[in-house]
Amino acid sequence: MTPNEEASMVTEDAFQAALDAEPDNNAMRLVFADWLEEAGDWRAEGYRWMGELGKFPYDWSKSTVVSGFRTFDWYLEDGGATWEVPEHCRLPAWFRKAFRTSLDWPDYVTRRLAEEALCRALAKVPPSRRQPRESRVTMLVRSR
Protein backbone atom coordinates (compact mmCIF):
# COMPACT_ATOMS: atom_id res chain seq x y z
CA MET A 1 0.00 0.00 0.00
CA THR A 2 1.34 3.41 -0.98
CA PRO A 3 1.45 6.32 1.50
CA ASN A 4 -1.32 8.07 -0.49
CA GLU A 5 -3.57 5.01 -0.29
CA GLU A 6 -2.86 4.70 3.42
CA ALA A 7 -3.63 8.37 4.02
CA SER A 8 -6.89 8.18 2.06
CA MET A 9 -8.23 5.26 4.09
CA VAL A 10 -10.86 6.44 6.53
CA THR A 11 -11.89 4.44 9.56
CA GLU A 12 -14.91 4.55 11.79
CA ASP A 13 -12.64 5.57 14.65
CA ALA A 14 -11.57 8.62 12.63
CA PHE A 15 -15.20 9.64 12.06
CA GLN A 16 -16.05 9.08 15.72
CA ALA A 17 -13.02 11.11 16.85
CA ALA A 18 -14.09 13.95 14.54
CA LEU A 19 -17.61 13.86 16.00
CA ASP A 20 -16.21 13.80 19.54
CA ALA A 21 -14.19 16.92 18.70
CA GLU A 22 -17.14 18.67 17.00
CA PRO A 23 -20.42 17.09 18.17
CA ASP A 24 -22.47 19.74 16.34
CA ASN A 25 -20.85 18.95 12.96
CA ASN A 26 -23.90 17.73 11.06
CA ALA A 27 -22.07 17.69 7.74
CA MET A 28 -19.66 15.14 9.25
CA ARG A 29 -22.65 13.00 10.33
CA LEU A 30 -23.91 13.03 6.74
CA VAL A 31 -20.52 12.03 5.35
CA PHE A 32 -20.31 9.31 8.01
CA ALA A 33 -23.82 8.14 7.01
CA ASP A 34 -22.69 7.82 3.39
CA TRP A 35 -19.58 5.93 4.48
CA LEU A 36 -21.69 3.58 6.64
CA GLU A 37 -24.15 3.05 3.78
CA GLU A 38 -21.33 2.13 1.39
CA ALA A 39 -20.18 -0.42 3.97
CA GLY A 40 -23.73 -1.81 4.30
CA ASP A 41 -23.94 -0.72 7.94
CA TRP A 42 -27.43 -0.58 9.49
CA ARG A 43 -26.61 2.68 11.34
CA ALA A 44 -26.44 4.73 8.12
CA GLU A 45 -30.10 5.75 8.22
CA GLY A 46 -29.85 6.92 11.83
CA TYR A 47 -26.75 9.03 11.25
CA ARG A 48 -28.35 10.51 8.13
CA TRP A 49 -31.48 11.37 10.14
CA MET A 50 -29.36 13.09 12.81
CA GLY A 51 -27.30 14.99 10.22
CA GLU A 52 -30.28 16.18 8.20
CA LEU A 53 -32.19 17.36 11.28
CA GLY A 54 -29.24 18.73 13.24
CA LYS A 55 -29.66 16.28 16.12
CA PHE A 56 -26.96 15.28 18.61
CA PRO A 57 -27.20 14.32 22.28
CA TYR A 58 -26.94 16.80 25.12
CA ASP A 59 -23.50 16.70 26.76
CA TRP A 60 -24.03 17.32 30.47
CA SER A 61 -20.31 17.79 31.08
CA LYS A 62 -20.62 21.10 29.19
CA SER A 63 -23.85 22.15 30.86
CA THR A 64 -24.35 25.58 32.35
CA VAL A 65 -27.64 24.42 33.88
CA VAL A 66 -26.37 21.74 36.27
CA SER A 67 -22.84 20.67 37.03
CA GLY A 68 -21.51 17.25 37.93
CA PHE A 69 -23.36 15.12 35.37
CA ARG A 70 -21.29 13.25 32.80
CA THR A 71 -23.90 11.70 30.53
CA PHE A 72 -25.11 12.28 26.97
CA ASP A 73 -28.90 12.53 26.80
CA TRP A 74 -31.77 12.63 24.35
CA TYR A 75 -34.99 14.37 25.44
CA LEU A 76 -38.39 13.21 24.27
CA GLU A 77 -40.65 16.10 23.23
CA ASP A 78 -43.57 14.82 25.25
CA GLY A 79 -41.39 14.60 28.38
CA GLY A 80 -41.47 16.73 31.45
CA ALA A 81 -38.23 18.68 31.26
CA THR A 82 -38.37 21.70 33.55
CA TRP A 83 -35.78 23.66 31.62
CA GLU A 84 -35.48 24.85 28.04
CA VAL A 85 -34.11 21.78 26.27
CA PRO A 86 -31.93 22.67 23.25
CA GLU A 87 -33.47 21.73 19.90
CA HIS A 88 -30.49 19.59 18.90
CA CYS A 89 -31.25 16.93 21.55
CA ARG A 90 -35.08 16.94 21.37
CA LEU A 91 -36.61 13.87 19.78
CA PRO A 92 -40.18 13.44 18.53
CA ALA A 93 -42.54 11.68 20.94
CA TRP A 94 -42.82 8.69 18.56
CA PHE A 95 -39.32 7.67 19.67
CA ARG A 96 -40.60 6.76 23.17
CA LYS A 97 -41.79 3.27 22.18
CA ALA A 98 -38.67 2.63 20.12
CA PHE A 99 -36.39 3.48 23.06
CA ARG A 100 -38.58 1.27 25.29
CA THR A 101 -38.16 3.51 28.26
CA SER A 102 -40.41 5.34 30.64
CA LEU A 103 -37.70 7.97 31.08
CA ASP A 104 -38.15 11.32 29.40
CA TRP A 105 -34.40 11.54 28.80
CA PRO A 106 -32.57 8.34 27.78
CA ASP A 107 -28.97 8.87 28.91
CA TYR A 108 -25.69 7.24 27.90
CA VAL A 109 -22.07 7.22 29.01
CA THR A 110 -20.72 8.45 25.65
CA ARG A 111 -21.94 10.41 22.63
CA ARG A 112 -21.31 7.40 20.46
CA LEU A 113 -23.50 5.11 22.60
CA ALA A 114 -26.27 7.73 22.61
CA GLU A 115 -26.15 8.04 18.83
CA GLU A 116 -26.08 4.29 18.28
CA ALA A 117 -29.10 3.95 20.58
CA LEU A 118 -30.92 6.47 18.41
CA CYS A 119 -29.95 4.44 15.31
CA ARG A 120 -31.38 1.29 16.92
CA ALA A 121 -34.55 3.11 17.98
CA LEU A 122 -35.07 4.59 14.51
CA ALA A 123 -34.62 1.16 12.92
CA LYS A 124 -37.47 -0.20 15.09
CA VAL A 125 -39.98 2.37 13.85
CA PRO A 126 -41.52 1.52 10.47
CA PRO A 127 -41.15 4.41 8.02
CA SER A 128 -44.94 4.68 7.78
CA ARG A 129 -45.15 5.50 11.51
CA ARG A 130 -42.46 8.19 11.45
CA GLN A 131 -43.14 11.86 11.00
CA PRO A 132 -41.91 13.15 7.68
CA ARG A 133 -38.26 14.12 7.70
CA GLU A 134 -37.64 17.80 7.25
CA SER A 135 -34.13 19.12 6.89
CA ARG A 136 -32.82 22.00 8.99
CA VAL A 137 -32.40 23.97 5.76
CA THR A 138 -36.12 23.60 4.97
CA MET A 139 -37.05 24.53 8.54
CA LEU A 140 -34.82 27.64 8.43
CA VAL A 141 -36.28 28.77 5.11
CA ARG A 142 -39.82 28.35 6.45
CA SER A 143 -39.04 30.36 9.59
CA ARG A 144 -38.04 33.43 7.55
Image (cartoon, rainbow, N blue to C red):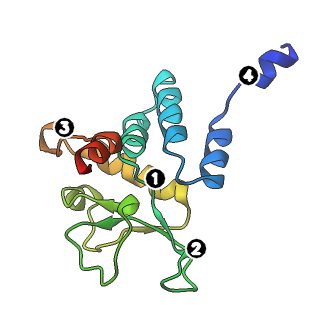
In the displayed structure, 111 sits above or below 132; it is below
- Determine whether, in the image, residue 68 is placed left or right of residue 96: right
Judge from the rendering whether residue 101 lies leftward or rightward of residue 30; answer left or right. left
Which residue lies under the disc numbered 3? 127
Mark 2 or 3: the one toward you? 2
Q: Which residue is mark 1?
A: 115
Q: Decide if residue 2 is on the left or right side of residue 114.
A: right
| N-terminal label among 4 and 2 | 4
Left or right position of 75 against 36: left
- Disc 4 and disc 2: Cα gap in Å? 33 Å
Q: Which amino acid type is marked by label 4?
A: Ser
Mark 2, residues whose alpha carbon is within 10 Å: few (<14), some, or many (≥20)?
Answer: few
Give the Cα distance between marks 3 and 4.
35 Å
Query: Which amino acid lies under the numbered mark 2 shown in the image of this protein?
Result: Lys
On the image, the x and y values in percent for residue 46 come to 38, 42
| Element marked by disc 3 | helix
Q: Secondary structure at mark 2?
A: helix
Foreground mark, 1 or 2, reads: 2
Give the number of the disc on residue 8.
4
**Which circle, 1 or 4, is nearer the viewer?**
4
In the image, 136 versus 18, the foreground residue is: 136
Q: Earlier in the sequence, mark 1 or mark 4?
A: 4
Q: Mark 4–mark 2 contact, CB under 8 Å?
A: no
Rounded to the nearest whole Å, what is the CA distance between mark 1 and mark 4?
Answer: 26 Å
Nearer the N terminus, badge 1 or badge 2?
2
Q: Amino acid at mark 1?
A: Glu
Residues packed near mark 1 inside 10 Å, few (<14), some (14 to 19) or many (20 plus): many
Q: CA distance from mark 3 to mark 1?
A: 19 Å
Work out whether mark 3 precedes mark 1 in sequence or the reverse, and give the earlier one: 1
Residue tagged by mark 2? 62
Q: Is residue 55 above or below residue 46?
A: below
